[in-house]
Image: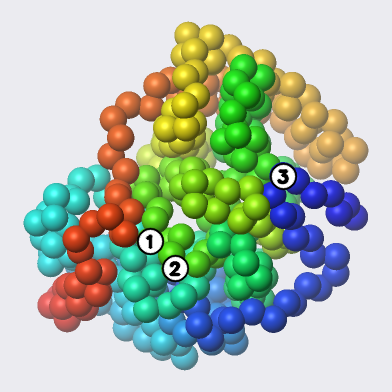
């Protein structure tokens, strides 16, 4: 068991940490898509939240009209103060279009919509995924406690070890070596901040409503990294904590195919590079892919030794093949289509909630 601190406050679970926290004043955001409907992991998550009884649960939902009403009926069976924010409904889409906020839909846009609603009426907000098969409701309090203690932003971290294998591949094989390659060439506080997170791609975080209202979110799978960029500005090193959530069992994605890790790597790399460019880092994009590969290869060697030490299965050639694939994403981030901070726009999030409710009422 270790107890090492990083540049940000690192809160370890030395046994069964269950700090007191203001769950009765917090809104919990749990994004879902059609694949979560009726899933065992989602059922477990919601059952655990029933025991926590937070002030509110918001489910930003991306689903077809045919499935949306079924979702609302299913979710209404849980003993929770719960609202479904149907993100792909006609009225919600029109509302965003009227404000010039239409554009590509994705997980980031879904979460952005629900975070605005959550921060409108609650001083604390927690966000986490619905596909965690090992989820514990106590994680809500673990994430919230440091926020109440004066850290405006708290990020979860956990081990991704399942079926005697190391997972967390995008973090291990893309994010971590890319940050390492950049730090070797640039002395910038933002890079030290990004490097301090033990699992930067975790979807689990808690924050004050004020910080949430100042987040610009990437529209797709880069939202976790993009969130760190604005947390750096608002909370900084001294206002950030990371919280040990133990070991998580998640659903896994293939490397290739729609919404596979290769596609996600493009969003993650673009978000990371956009964050550092915003803070004055000017990467040499001609040299950066090779520097990334060198850093990633060294990490693969370390993971191989760690897996062998623990008797885990490990396919080094497959991991290096993934590095080659992810290296294609190490390039200039392109156009910035991030959603703006709620604090900077003329849109009442409660209008979004009302539109989502009306859309659900009209769903077939």
Q: Residues within 10 Å of mark 1 (few under 14, many from 20)?
A: many
Q: Residue furthest top?
A: 286
| Residue 277 rendering spot, x and y as whole percentages | 44, 28
Label 2 neighbour load within 10 Å: few <14, some 14-19, many 20+ = many
**Quadrant housing the N terminus:** bottom right
- Gap in angstroms between the C-alphas marked 3 and 2: 24 Å
Q: Is residue 308 left or right of residue 359?
A: right
At x 43%, y 77%, the residue is: 122
Looking at the image, is 179 positioned above or below residue 96?
Answer: above
Residue 363 left/right relative to 57: left
2 and 1 marks in contact (CB < 8 Å)? yes
Residue 312 in the image: x percent, y percent? 81, 42
As measured in the structure, the alpha-carbon distance from the residue carrying label 2 to the one carrying label 1 is 6 Å
Rendered residue at 65%/52% (across/down): 238
The percent position of residue 114, horizontal first and vertical second, equals 35, 66
Query: Is 88 in front, or is 232?
Result: 232
Residue in the image at 19% along x and 60% along y: 346
Mark 1 or mark 3, which is nearer the start of the sequence? 3
Q: CA distance from mark 3 to mark 1?
A: 25 Å
* 238 is higher (above) or lower (below) than 193: below
Local crowd at mark 3 within 10 Å, few (<14), some, or many (≥20)? some
Residue 7: assigned label? 3
What residue is pinned by disc 1?
A: 213
Q: Residue at x 47, y 19 (%)?
A: 282
User: Relative to 295, is 344 above or below?
Assistant: below
Left or right side of 152 for 14: right
């Amino acid at each position: 068991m270790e107890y090492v601190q990083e540049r940000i406050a690192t809160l370890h679970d030395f046994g069964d940490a269950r700090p007191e926290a203001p769950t009765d004043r917090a809104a919990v955001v749990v994004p879902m898509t059609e694949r979560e409907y009726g899933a065992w992991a989602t059922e477990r998550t919601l059952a655990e939240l029933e025991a926590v009884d937070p002030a509110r649960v918001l489910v930003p939902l991306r689903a077809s009209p045919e499935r949306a009403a079924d979702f609302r009926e299913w979710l209404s069976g849980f003993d929770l103060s719960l609202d479904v924010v149907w993100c792909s409904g006609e009225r919600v889409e029109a509302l965003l279009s009227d404000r010039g906020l239409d554009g590509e839909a994705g997980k980031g846009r879904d979460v952005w919509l629900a975070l605005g609603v959550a921060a409108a009426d609650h001083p604390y907000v927690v966000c986490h995924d619905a596909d965690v098969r090992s989820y514990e409701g106590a994680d809500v309090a673990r994430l919230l406690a440091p926020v109440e203690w004066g850290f405006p932003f708290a990020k979860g971290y956990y081990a991704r070890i399942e079926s005697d294998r190391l997972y967390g591949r995008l973090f291990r094989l893309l994010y971590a070596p890319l940050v390492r390659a950049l730090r070797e060439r640039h002395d910038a506080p933002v890079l030290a901040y990004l490097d301090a997170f033990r699992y930067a791609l975790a979807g689990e975080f808690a924050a004050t409503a004020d910080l949430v209202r100042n987040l610009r979110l990437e529209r797709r799978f880069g939202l976790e990294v993009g969130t760190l960029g604005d947390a750096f500005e608002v909370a900084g090193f001294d206002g950030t904590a990371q919280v040990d959530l133990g070991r998580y069992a998640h659903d896994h994605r293939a490397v290739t195919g729609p919404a596979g890790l290769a596609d996600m790597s493009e969003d993650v790399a673009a978000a990371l590079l956009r964050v550092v460019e915003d803070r004055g880092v000017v990467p040499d994009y001609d040299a950066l892919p090779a520097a990334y590969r060198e850093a990633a290869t060294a990490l693969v060697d370390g993971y191989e030794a760690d897996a062998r030490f623990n008797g885990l299965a490990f396919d080094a050639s497959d991991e290096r093949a993934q590095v080659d694939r992810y290296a294609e994403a190490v390039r200039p981030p392109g156009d910035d289509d991030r959603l703006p901070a709620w604090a900077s726009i003329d849109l009442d999030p409660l209008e979004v909630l009302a539109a989502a409710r009306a859309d659900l009422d009209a769903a077939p």
